Structure formats: structure tokens, C-alpha cells
């Protein structure tokens, strides 16, 4: 059991609540009790200790007494459902909730099978870890591939590629044309590309004067030769040519000797690329991209690689790098680097049947989870009266659609009502809790926005179904009494650890009072119990009149009791909003009926009591519970000269609200009246 103590938190000066582990703990309280404060205090203490100061009471804003929460050291993780969760709940375009795969599919069984598959193919991963040349091979092959352009065409390599542009006019670097032979040392220098670019940019100064812009020497006889360099060596094409030659020089041993010579011949040619040469370059480009794709796929190989419908044997075959069929790269250097990968693939092939079995189990588990979760959620939606269905796409992401359409809803915030959004938020919060399994789950007034049928459907889904929060440690803070009636009286849960308490705060002191099954009474039982329990006849009259009111039985007895409460010297009968004097036979029958419950009832004696303010005020001050004080206050003041509209509204609602409630808590045992209401009543009575 967890005992949580709160001090100096908002309206709570001091208080304690208990939480039973692995059970539902309902804390029922009226508005203003401090339920949200409890939720925030626990959340801040576990996850955001610095934020606990946000609950500092106004009387302590100078920092004298900071909020303090104790007793939750063993709670390391917490999830809370409140307004913030609902407001932050975003229906994404591709799925209802982020990480739906992790929430609905990635359970312990999934993780176990996932690891078993990864263990089967671990040899591939080990090969990449121990053979660093594999990553180097991928990097270098990408450099070579880039020279051939992004993608080959049907007839050859892309015209925009470095290879094509660099050789568009042939190789004029290995053999410098006679027209510019005197610049050969510059052209063949290691910094030749920079020089060509510099020389090309300098041409724009030739029109200024016939002298050299550096030495001012006469260059009128050399102007045509200087301009010729830019004609023969266009800077960008020249740069591409140099890059290609450098690439072949550095990575030439990746190619087999025959292919290397072919490429050398193509790059040394003085003329542009022929159609036959284009076909060779296309073959090289296509083969190098196949090898890169296979290497990257092998590096990324894991359980996910086998989730599609492809057979394991076919998948392994697709990943093998067969250099006999990729002849341009059948070189000693490439074979040495990839041999370990192919050996690992062969080892997997020897166990392919066992791996296929694991993959099959994995796929079936995913399919079962998808179907089960889909059915569970859709059954709830039907039972709760929502006209929506969910489904899972090929990636097991959960999506939403209306029952009248096959189209996925991509903007749930726009289409769903506030209540529908709350229901989905609550439902998916449950699944998220199941997936993350926190130490404590807090529900802060989770069902107040739903009607009674939906409340029961949601509570049943949350705590009674097999795949639910049943047997998890849950703190539910609510001002709804229906869940307690449903789960502790009518359709009791099968978890004996579940418990309910009324929490109330009086003068800053919060306390909880356990609610047992026998404490959940019909309003008739509440009235009978207090008529029998009380000694004072006016209190008895209050409860008996409430009982007749709840039964909608406005007979003679009801009329006579009402006349007492309204201090009428002569009994009156109210019918269709009009009052008339009660007839003697009516009074006689009424008194006889009332005396079955209150044997010593006498109308005139009761009128004398209720008409005596001093006696009634003493009765008010000595009342044993706040509910009775409220009813006595109404008799004393008749709500005349009471200018507090909130007080008016609360007392009138309390006077009649029992009609809407089948079950009640005994007000003698459970305090359900807010502090400020009683304080105001006491203040008015004191000054009367």
C-alpha cells in the first residue's frame, strides 16, 4: 500500500490518501476538494520536482512553507490523464496517435521473436562491425557512382553527369593541343583546375588594354593564344575531367583489369564518347548501384527486413553479391571485402527453414495483435454509440474512419466532437499505459464529460476487459458517483483490491473516508436511516419530506410536511402552482400517514419549533452534518434577504437534486457540502 502525504499544496494544508497496489483506487469528491492538486502534486514529485513550487499556497508566496509530498519514493514512473493530455492529443495525418506501432504491436512476445530473428542474422551485423573496409567500400563506390550521374538512362549515362560532361570534347589533358603547348606545365600541374578557372576569369581584362594585367608587358601578339585556352578547356568540364581521372587513379583497383582498361581507354580518348562507350559506362553505373543497394540493405538487415510477404530464402538470394554477374567489379579488392558477407549469408541459408519458421511466427503474431486490437477498439466504439471504426495499415499504424465511409480520416480534430475526442484520448491512453507499464496511472476526472451509458462503457473497457488497466495501480480522481455505484454495488469488479473513498477538505485539512458496498444506499434508505437515527423531529421531517419528494409522491402527507418546512400556521395544499387550505380530512389522513414514520408528529408543535428562530439556530449549530445544516438554513431563512446567488443556486439544487440519483451516500457519514457554502451559511446565521 502507498500512503501519500500532501502539505501546503494549493487548498490542501495537510492531507493523506492511500493507494492499494495493483488495483483501482477511486477518490470521489465534490468540486473544490483538491483532486487536480493531488494529481499535479504526485506528477511533479515523480517527474518534475522543480514544478512542485507551482502549487505554493498564496498565503505562503513569500516562500516560508513550500509544498511537500511524501510517501511516493517507490514510484519511478507515472502516466496521467487530464486536460493537458486531451489538449495535446493530436490526430496525426498518417495515424491516430504517434507511435501506434509501439503501443499496439510491440509487446513482450514481439520483442522476443524480434530478438530471435536478429540473432539468426547477427553474422551480417558482426561482419560490418569487424570489417571496417565494408563501410569504406560503400563510401568509395558512392563517389564512383556519383561521377556517372544520379541514374543511367536507357541508352547510357546521364548527359548531366560529371563523366559525360568531362569527356564531352575528349581528353585534352593527357596530350595538350599544339595551339596551347607552351602552357603545358600549367595545364598538367596539380593545381590545374584552379589555374584554368583563374585564366578563364582573366579573359575579361583583355579588352581593357594590350598589356598584361600583372606585369603590364605587351601581350597583343599572344591574345589569341590566351583566349584559345578557354575555348579548349572550359573550366567546369575541365574540372569534371580531372575529377574522373583522379577517381580512376584512386579507385581503379575496384574494377576488374579488363573493365579498368576499357574505362582508361574511354577517358584517354581525344574524341567525345561513342555510343558503344556509353553502353559500357551504363553497365558500370548499373552494376555499381546494384552493389551499393545490396551493401546498404545488408548493413540495415534486421527483423523488419522480413516483415513483408517475401520468403526468407528469396530475400537472402536477393542480398547475395554475385560478382560473376557483376563482372565490372570482379576484382581482388572487392572480392576480399565482400567475401565475409557472402559467407555469413551462406550460414543463414543453411538454417533458412528455422529462420522461415521464426519469421512466420513473427508475422502471425503481428496479424493476431492487429486483428485483436482492431476488434477490441471497434467493439467499444459500437457499445459506446460512436459511429467510427479503426483499422491498421500495412505498417500497423492505427487509422480512423467513419462507418459510412471507407476513407481514412486524416484530421480527427476537425471531424470529431469534444466528447468523441475525449473518448478516443481516454481509450488510446489506456493502450499506451499497457504498453509503457508505469508504476502509477492517474486519471484526473476522466469521464465527467460523458453521459451515463458512455461512462459505463468506458469504465468497463478500462477496468473489466481482459486487455485493460485491470490489476494495474490506478488512482482515479472524480466527482462522478456513478462509477462507484457501478463497480462496487451493481456490477462489482473481479479485483478484490479495488477500493473507493470519499475525499473531503475542511478548513484546509483533507481526509479520505472509505466507501464500502453497504455504504452505497438508495436515497430511500438514506432517508429511512436518518429518520430512525435522529432524535430531533424537525430533522426527521426534513428526511421524510425528501423521501416523498424522491418518490414524486405529493400526497396529503407531503403537503403537510411541506407546510411545516415553509412555516405555514395553517396547512396548505399546493396544486398546479396554486395554494389552498388543506381540509380537515386531508390533515387527518396526512398526520396518520406521517406518524407511521414519526410517531410523535404534531403539526402545531412542529410549527412552533420552526417559527422560533432561536430554537432553530441552536438546532443549526448542533447539527451533526453539513447536509442537515443546509436544510435547516433553508427553513430558517426561507432564502429571504440572502443575496449570495451562488448560495441560492447550491441550496436549491441540493434541495431537489436527489430525484436524479438512485444511489446516495449517507450525509451523516460522508461530508458532501463545500466549505464555502457552510461558511457562508454559518456567517449569515451568526448575524441573524
Image (spheres, rainbow, N blue to C red):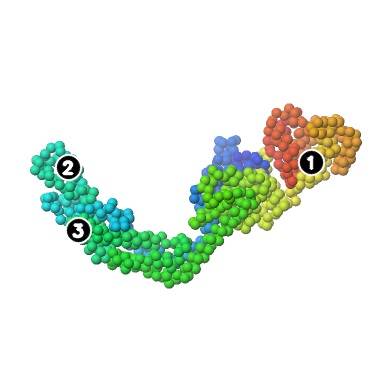
Dot 2: few (<14), some (14–19), or many (≥20) neighbours within 10 Å?
some
Q: Is residue 262 left or right of residue 27?
A: left
Q: Are marks 2 and 3 in contact (CB under 8 Å)?
A: no
For the point 57% across and 56% down, the residue is: 374
Vertical comparison of 680 with 664: above or below: above
Task: Return the x and y of residue 147 as percentages of the image width and height.
Answer: 28, 55
Q: Is residue 244 visible?
A: yes
Task: Return the x and y of residue 99 as percentages of the image width and height.
Answer: 50, 52
Q: Is residue 68 visible?
A: no
Vertical comparison of 374 with 330: above or below: above
Label 1 – label 2 distance at C-alpha: 107 Å
For the point 61% across and 51% down, the residue is: 381
Vertical comparison of 27 with 363: above or below: above
Q: Mark 2 falls on what kind of element?
A: helix
Q: Residue at label 2?
A: 203
Q: Mark 3 falls on what kind of element?
A: helix
Give the farthest residue toward the top.
Answer: 641
> What is the total number of numbered labels drawn onto the structure image?
3
Q: Residue at label 1?
A: 552
Task: Return the x and y of residue 628 as percentages of the image width and height.
Answer: 76, 38
Label 1 – label 3 distance at C-alpha: 108 Å
Label 2 – label 3 distance at C-alpha: 28 Å
Residue 268, numbered circle: 3
N-term-proximal mark, 1 vs 3 = 3
Task: Return the x and y of residue 416 as percentages of the image width and height.
Answer: 57, 45
Please tell me in which quadrant of the rendered image residue 291 appears.
bottom left
Q: Nearer the viewer, mark 1 or mark 3?
A: 3
Q: Is residue 112 left or right of residue 519?
A: left
For the point 45% across and 70% down, the residue is: 352
For the point 16% across and 39% down, the residue is: 205
Amino acid at each position: 500500500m502507498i500512503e501519500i502525504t500532501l502539505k501546503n499544496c494549493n487548498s490542501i494544508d495537510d492531507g493523506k490518501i492511500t493507494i492499494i497496489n495493483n488495483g483501482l483506487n477511486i477518490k470521489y469528491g465534490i468540486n473544490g476538494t483538491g483532486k487536480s492538486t493531488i494529481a499535479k502534486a504526485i506528477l511533479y514529485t515523480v517527474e518534475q520536482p522543480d514544478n512542485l513550487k507551482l502549487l505554493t499556497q498564496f498565503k505562503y508566496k513569500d516562500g516560508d512553507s513550500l509544498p511537500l509530498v511524501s510517501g511516493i519514493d517507490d514510484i519511478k514512473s507515472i502516466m496521467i490523464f487530464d486536460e493537458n493530455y486531451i489538449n495535446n492529443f493530436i490526430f496525426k495525418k498518417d495515424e491516430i496517435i504517434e507511435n501506434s506501432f509501439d503501443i499496439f504491436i510491440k509487446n513482450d512476445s514481439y520483442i522476443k521473436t524480434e530478438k530471435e530473428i536478429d540473432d539468426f542474422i547477427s553474422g551480417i551485423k558482426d561482419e560490418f562491425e569487424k570489417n571496417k573496409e565494408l563501410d569504406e567500400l560503400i563510401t568509395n563506390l558512392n563517389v564512383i557512382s556519383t561521377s556517372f550521374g544520379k541514374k543511367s538512362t536507357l541508352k547510357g549515362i546521364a548527359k548531366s553527369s560529371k563523366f559525360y560532361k568531362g569527356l564531352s570534347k575528349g581528353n585534352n589533358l593527357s596530350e595538350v593541343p599544339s595551339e596551347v603547348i607552351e602552357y603545358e606545365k600549367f595545364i598538367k600541374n596539380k593545381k590545374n583546375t584552379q589555374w584554368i578557372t583563374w585564366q578563364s576569369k582573366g579573359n575579361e581584362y583583355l579588352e581593357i588594354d594590350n598589356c598584361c594585367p600583372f606585369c603590364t608587358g605587351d601581350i597583343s601578339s599572344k591574345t589569341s593564344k590566351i583566349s584559345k585556352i578557354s575555348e579548349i578547356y572550359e573550366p567546369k568540364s575541365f574540372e569534371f575531367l580531372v575529377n574522373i581521372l583522379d577517381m580512376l587513379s584512386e579507385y581503379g583497383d575496384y574494377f576488374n583489369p579488363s573493365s579498368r582498361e576499357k574505362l582508361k581507354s574511354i577517358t584517354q580518348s581525344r574524341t567525345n564518347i561513342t555510343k558503344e562507350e556509353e553502353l559500357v559506362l551504363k553497365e558500370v553505373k548499373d552494376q555499381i548501384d546494384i552493389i551499393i543497394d545490396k551493401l546498404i540493405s545488408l548493413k540495415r538487415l534486421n527483423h523488419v527486413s522480413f516483415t513483408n510477404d517475401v520468403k526468407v530464402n528469396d530475400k537472402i538470394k536477393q542480398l547475395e553479391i554475385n560478382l560473376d554477374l557483376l563482372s565490372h567489379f570482379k576484382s581482388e579488392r572487392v572480392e576480399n571485402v565482400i567475401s565475409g558477407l557472402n559467407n555469413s549469408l551462406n550460414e543463414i541459408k543453411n538454417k533458412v527453414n528455422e529462420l522461415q519458421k521464426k519469421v512466420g511466427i513473427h508475422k502471425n503474431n503481428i496479424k493476431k495483435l492487429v486483428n485483436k486490437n482492431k476488434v477490441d477498439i471497434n467493439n467499444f466504439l459500437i457499445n459506446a454509440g460512436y459511429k467510427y471504426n479503426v483499422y491498421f495499415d500495412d505498417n500497423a499504424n492505427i487509422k480512423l474512419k467513419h462507418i459510412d465511409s471507407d476513407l481514412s480520416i486524416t484530421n480527427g480534430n476537425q471531424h470529431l466532437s469534444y466528447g468523441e475526442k475525449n473518448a478516443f484520448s481516454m481509450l488510446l491512453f489506456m493502450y499506451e499505459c499497457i504498453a509503457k507499464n508505469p508504476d502509477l496511472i492517474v486519471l484526473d476526472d476522466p469521464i465527467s464529460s460523458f453521459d451515463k451509458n458512455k461512462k459505463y462503457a468506458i469504465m468497463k473497457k478500462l477496468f473489466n476487459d481482459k486487455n485493460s488497466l485491470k490489476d494495474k495501480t490506478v488512482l482515479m480522481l472524480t466527482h462522478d458517483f456513478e462509477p462507484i455505484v457501478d463497480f462496487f454495488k451493481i456490477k462489482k469488479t473481479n479485483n478484490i483490491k479495488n477500493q473507493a473513498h470519499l475525499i473531503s477538505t475542511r478548513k484546509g485539512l483533507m481526509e479520505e473516508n472509505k466507501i464500502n458496498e453497504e455504504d452505497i444506499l438508495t436515497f430511500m434508505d438514506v432517508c429511512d436511516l436518518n429518520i430512525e437515527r435522529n432524535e430531533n423531529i424537525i430533522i426527521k421531517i426534513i428526511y421524510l419530506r425528501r423521501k416523498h419528494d424522491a418518490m414524486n409522491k405529493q400526497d396529503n402527507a407531503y403537503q403537510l410536511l411541506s407546510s411545516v418546512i415553509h412555516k405555514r400556521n395553517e396547512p396548505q395544499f399546493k396544486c398546479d402552482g396554486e395554494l389552498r387550505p388543506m381540509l380537515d380530512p386531508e390533515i387527518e389522513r396526512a398526520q396518520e400517514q406521517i406518524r407511521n414514520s414519526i410517531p410523535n408528529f404534531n403539526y402545531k408543535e412542529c410549527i412552533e419549533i420552526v417559527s422560533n428562530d432561536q430554537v432553530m439556530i441552536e438546532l443549526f449549530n448542533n447539527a451533526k452534518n453539513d447536509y442537515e445544516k443546509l436544510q435547516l438554513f433553508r427553513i430558517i431563512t426561507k432564502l429571504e434577504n440572502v443575496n449570495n446567488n451562488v448560495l441560492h443556486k447550491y441550496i436549491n439544487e441540493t434541495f431537489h437534486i436527489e430525484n436524479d440519483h438512485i444511489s446516495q451516500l449517507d450525509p451523516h457519514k460522508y461530508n458532501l457540502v463545500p466549505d464555502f457554502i457552510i461558511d457562508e451559511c454559518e456567517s449569515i446565521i451568526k448575524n441573524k
